Image (cartoon, grey):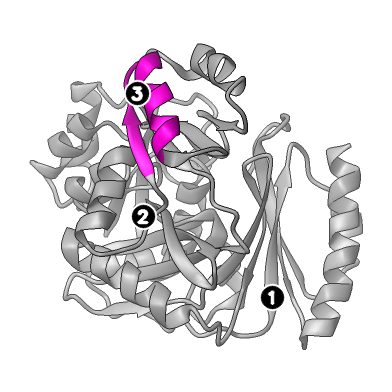
């Protein structure tokens, strides 16, 4: 079977690496000249609005998916009108606008922080009165890894935030003094079978994920599965979906969904019986889902900007290294490593060692 992927970044790369043992081949459509997934399949180098290239893409594959949630809605609809596109376009668009996403959570009875849509500078003043300060002003579209947002801590911050983000649809969200950040990785097959990985505790810095640690028997596992399951059913979703939460007062508040495989699930390649990438491919091709069970205590660490030397990384026992083939660049995810251990104490010791190498590589 030949699978088309809209986008050819590191997620597409890891989907292909998971798919070749299952006898799948891949075609990527991506406007980037040096797309890091391109060496793992055919690369159609074209924009997402190029209908001629999209037609070529559709006739060359049996079905399609995406590794990038900001694929234009028109592109998804074009592809879905010709071949199966999974997850469907409605799932893609659900997570592209932060306001419609929050409204969907409201309809499904999933708790969210207070939020107010903002269209003008005057509306921002009124929104602040409704949410209080501190609050976070965000673009409704295209923000990721901390981009497209500003924290408002006092009234004097409004002018600078508006100067940077104004002139486009925005949303103001009440700042959540969270205790933890969790994500739930869920997968749903074409037959409606669902499975969930252990919830993942995430640590961000500068808006970018730094570490992701699966938590076996977390007290919020059932609640996270309930909320993720509601979204899967509502969207008639097929594939892997990541649901990110804040933990405040011991309960979950919805942050956002990502309708694709997700950075907080990279640990599943070595740390779970069946990785998120293989399970996504199983789901969209109609195969039975694989086990989401944890193999061993583990943690995933991102390489941001640059990666430590392989000679240093390879000296750490049971460390699994993944380079993405990207040119080093500040604030860019260039790779990750997953550390497995026999117990929590050993995991913490080796993680300290790994993070010291990462800090050195980041300068």
Give the image location of residue 249, x and y in percent.
Answer: 54, 69
From the viewer's side, name the closer residue of 300 and 97.
97
Neighbour tally class for label 2: few under 14, some 14-19, many 20 plus, Cα within 10 Å: some
Say which of marks 1 and 2 sits in front. 1
Give the image location of residue 268, x and y in percent.
Answer: 55, 71
Label 3 secondary element = loop
| Residue highlighted by disc 2 | 25
Magenta residues: mostly which secondary structure? helix
From the viewer's side, name the closer residue of 265 and 204.
204
Neighbour tally class for label 1: few under 14, some 14-19, many 20 plus, Cα within 10 Å: many
Residue 14 against residue 351 in the figure, above or below: above
From the viewer's side, name the closer residue of 89 and 125.
125
Q: What stretch is highlighted in magenta?
A: 115-130
**In magenta stretch: residue 116:** yes
Residue 321 against residue 274 in the figure, above or below: above
Q: Quote the CA–CA distance across marks 3 and 1.
A: 38 Å
| Residue highlighted by disc 1 | 298
Question: Could you tell me if residue 265 is visible in this image?
Answer: no
Neighbour tally class for label 3: few under 14, some 14-19, many 20 plus, Cα within 10 Å: some
Looking at the image, which residue is at 37% across and 76% down? 225
Question: Could you tell me if residue 115 is visible in this image?
Answer: yes
């Amino acid at each position: 079977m030949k699978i088309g992927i809209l986008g050819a970044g590191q997620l597409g790369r890891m989907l292909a690496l998971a798919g070749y043992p299952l006898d799948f081949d891949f075609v990527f459509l991506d406007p980037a000249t040096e797309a890091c997934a391109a060496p793992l399949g055919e690369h159609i180098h074209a924009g997402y609005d190029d209908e001629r290239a999209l037609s070529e893409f559709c006739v060359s594959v049996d079905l399609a998916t995406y590794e990038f949630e900001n694929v234009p809605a028109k592109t998804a609809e074009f592809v879905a009108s010709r071949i199966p596109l999974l997850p469907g376009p409605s799932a893609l668009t659900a997570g592209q606008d932060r306001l419609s996403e929050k409204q969907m959570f409201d309809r499904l009875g999933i708790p969210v922080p207070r939020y107010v849509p903002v269209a003008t500078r005057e509306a921002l003043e009124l929104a602040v009165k409704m949410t209080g300060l501190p609050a976070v002003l965000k673009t409704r579209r295209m923000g990721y890894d901390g981009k497209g947002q500003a924290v408002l801590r006092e009234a004097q911050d409004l002018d600078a935030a508006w100067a940077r983000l104004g002139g486009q649809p925005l949303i103001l969200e009440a700042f959540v003094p969270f205790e933890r950040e969790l994500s739930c990785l869920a997968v749903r097959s074409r037959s409606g079978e669902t499975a969930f990985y252990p919830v993942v505790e995430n640590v961000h810095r500068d808006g970018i994920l730094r570490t992701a640690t699966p938590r076996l028997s977390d007290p919020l596992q059932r609640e996270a599965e309930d909320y993720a399951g509601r979204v899967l059913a509502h969207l008639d979703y097929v594939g892997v979906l990541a649901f990110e939460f804040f933990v405040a007062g011991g309960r979950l508040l919805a942050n956002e969904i990502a309708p694709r495989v997700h950075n907080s699930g990279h640990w599943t390649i070595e740390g779970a019986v069946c990785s998120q990438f293989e399970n996504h491919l199983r789901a969209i091709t109609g195969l039975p889902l694989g086990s989401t069970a944890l193999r061993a205590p583990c943690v995933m660490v991102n390489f941001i900007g640059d990666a430590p030397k392989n000679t240093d990384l390879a000296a750490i026992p049971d460390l699994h290294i993944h380079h993405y083939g990207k040119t080093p660049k500040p604030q860019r995810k260039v790779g990750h490593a997953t550390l497995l251990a026999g117990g929590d104490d050993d995991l913490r010791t080796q993680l300290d060692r790994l993070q010291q190498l990462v800090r050195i590589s980041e300068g």
